[in-house]
Image: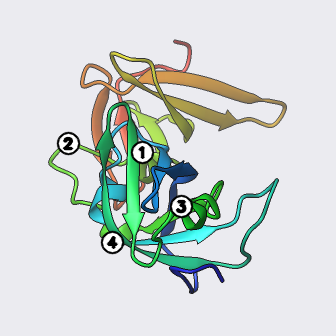
Amino acid sequence: MLPGLEAAELPADAIEVGRILDGWGIKGWFKVLPYSADPEALFSSKRWFLLPTEKGQKTFSGTGRLKIKEAKFHSDSVVACAHDIDDRNAADALRGARIFVSRESFPTAQKDEYYWVDLIGLDVVNREGQNLGQVRELLSTGPQTVLVIDEVLPEQTVQRMIPFVSAYIDDVKLPERRILVDWQPDY
């Protein structure tokens, strides 16, 4: 295991939130590519779980836990530093590592706010009770987010895109794993 990286098990509720791009500066800081435009999960968690990159150079194997001292925005990117990562070489050794954070360490979402990861896999049902499929992914189009829904039929899979705005979304019921929408199958 690398200095600063402790052997650990990946938590059952771990979610991949970004990856380490490269060392930054000479004091052990590193650049991070967050997978969210609002990387609060990276900022709020003081323990990141790392897995080596799936391809390319692997400087460590297995799962490692990194104790984060600080993570912050710098210009147009995110940078972080960790305990026992004291120089550029140690930071560079983490290049490409995939970053996971325990879901329980995410900040609590406000009313009518949802983490995308919580919406993926939910059933989408319209006002008439017709199942329109399941959320496969979400797309950020700039002004709004769009649900990408797959309905699996016997001969084909139908893809729908529904803007995730109050005009079309009636309710999100996370415990029931369902989103209620004002949308018709032929839209």
Image point 58% across, 78% down: which residue? Answer: 64
For label 1, the residue is: 116
Please tell me which residue lies in front, 131 or 12.
Answer: 12
Please tell me which of labels 4 and 1 falls first in the chain: 4
Name the disc covering residue 112, or none.
2
For label 3, the residue is: 99
Residue 120: x and y, percent?
50, 47
Image point 21% across, 59% down: which residue? Answer: 108
Residue 143: x and y, percent?
33, 15
Please tell me which of labels 2 and 3 falls first in the chain: 3
Q: Amino acid at mark 4?
A: Lys
For label 4, the residue is: 46
How far apart, in angstroms, are the residues tagged by discs 4 and 2? Answer: 26 Å
Q: Amino acid at mark 1?
A: Trp
How far apart, in angstroms, are the residues tagged by discs 2 and 3? Answer: 27 Å
Q: Secondary structure at mark 4?
A: loop
Farthest-out residue, front: 26
Q: Is residue 140 above or below residue 86?
A: above
Does any portion of residue 112 appear in the rendered image?
Answer: yes
Please tell me which of labels 3 and 1 falls first in the chain: 3
Q: Secondary structure at mark 3?
A: strand
Mark in front: 2 vs 3: 3
